[in-house]
Image (cartoon, rainbow, N blue to C red):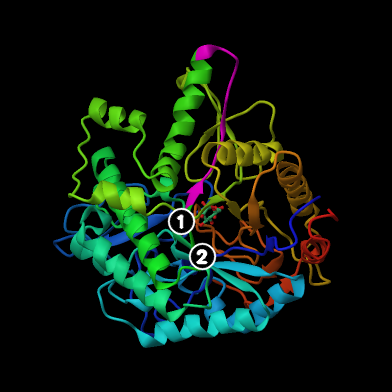
Amino acid sequence: MGFPQNFLWGGATAANQYEGGYLAGGKGLSTLDAITGGSKDQPRMITFKTKEGEVQQVTRESSLPEGAVGYVDPEQYYPSHVATDFYHHYKEDIALFAEMGFNCFRFSISWARVCPKGLKEINEEGLAFYDRVIDELLKYNIEPVVTINHFDIPMYLADTYDGWSDRNVIDYFLFFCETIFKRYKGKVKYWMTFNEINFLRSWTQIGIHNSTPQSKFQAAHHLFVASAKAVELGHSINPENQIGMMVAYIPSYPMTSKPEDVWAAIEYNRQQEFYMDVQVKGYYPEHQLKKYEREGITIHKEAGDDDWIAKGTVDFIGFSYYMSTASTADPENAKYVGGNQVPAVKNPYLNESEWGWAIDPLGLRISLVQMYERYHVPLFIVENGFGAVDELTVAGTVEDDYRIDYFAKHIQCMKEAVELDGVDLIGYTPWGCIDLVSAGTGEMKKRYGFIYVDMDDQGNGTLKRYKKKSFDWYKEVIRSNGEKL
Ligand code: BG6
């Protein structure tokens, strides 16, 4: 009973939120290097230069004028430039992960560090950094779990090609994939192609200047083809590779038993299932094709695309789970709270974190069951966690009982899904196992880690690491294989 003996326990991070060293060792600029910090009430801004050379900024969800190029403005503060500096602290951090007992660690490889412009030119120094990281992990028998692309694109590809709206980017991405599949053959087995593919829509994430339903879904098609080809390529380079997709899973419940509310929930959930249907089943679901027809969206495909999508299905589903939401047929009169990337309808039965994310441990069991019964492939929870304001005490720790409580309840539900529902769950990597920059708000104040990093929202701090109370707690969870919560 309980979790399988080979269960993967670890933590998760992403290059742009954790590494820093934004120009170190020949790295090129990534779109996320040109996005400022923000807060709950103040959006992050993209800074860019217009065709005419004027420096401007827009909120990160907005479109950029045609011909605009990303610009790092010396007058602004960009939290990802130093982040929490994994680039210079990787040995110390990996030693702490090992001390907690991690047997896996999820991180992403920065495309712009390996291919500075995103083109077919390799930056050896960038690869050498990941060589060191991977060797350090393997030294402690920690299995590397690699996200190939987490929320950004080399800025050159955004500026010159309009990012993923251009089919040529598929080829550049595959060059990057081939480089790292070959380099880490026999060292890395678990890969995921695109982080939270269902959220990819803006300039920072996929490099498209004009974000409309047409451009977003055309780009999604290119991402699907790229992912499918990457799966095939990864399997051909090493048949041992396990290559997954990654989706942000936010289950939505009907607000009431009114059939119209039930229907609203079905429609909400379809918008995340669609991405899984394509990548796991290997075809576009009928309802999505009908939606395209209704909304006048035309997907330009090349001959063979559908075959690639059918062939390149993934080995597992990696997903993030933080919260659930509710759906109503009357959204204008609903109450909204915060949410992962987009605001969510308030569920009156749930409380929320300070950032408005609904806390719903049972929702994790519901998600696992829904996904497993629908797709029947192994599942991997690659993100889960509680973003909170942490106070460092004079004793040099954080009494984060709220985080322990959140994790204990979620792991309990996850265990029930394995023990009672028979879900094939292969691992669990809580998000931001060490403090890092928030993707949504750009804050350091919103912390997730078991390890506190001394860094604030203005870039002040020693970057010194401190163990929070949850550090020892999680260590015991891993030691007992999830029995001691
Ligand atoms: C997921 C992302 O959406 O949630 C991460 O994959 C992100 O990159 C995480 O950091 C938590 O969100 P936030 O906005 O609190 O950082």
Neighbor class of circle 1 (other Cα within 10 Å; few <14, some 14-19, many 20+) is many
Left of 241 or right of it: where is 25?
Answer: left
Three-letter code for the amino acid on which mark 1 is drawn? Asn
Which numbered circle lies on residue 477?
A: none
Say whether residue 258 is magenta.
Answer: yes
Residue contact between numbered discs 1 and 2, judged by CB atoms under 8 Å: yes
Rendered location of residue 281, percent (x, y)? 42, 43
Left of 217 or right of it: where is 478?
Answer: right
Rendered location of residue 467, percent (x, y)? 76, 70
Q: Which residues are drawn in magenta?
A: 246-259
Question: In what element is the residue under mark 1?
Answer: loop
> Going by the picture, which residue comes out furthest to the right?
484
The residue lying toward the viewer, choosing from 284 and 469, is 284
Is residue 434 visible to the viewer in this orientation of the structure?
A: yes
**Residue at label 2?**
14
Confirm or reject: label 2 Cβ below 8 Å from ligand 1. Answer: yes
Confirm or reject: label 1 Cβ below 8 Å from ligand 1. Answer: yes
Left of 73 or right of it: where is 326?
Answer: right
Dot 1 or dot 2, earlier in sequence: 2
Neighbor class of circle 2 (other Cα within 10 Å; few <14, some 14-19, many 20+) is many
Say whether residue 52 is magenta.
Answer: no
**Residue at label 1?**
195
Rendered location of residue 48, percent (x, y)? 27, 61
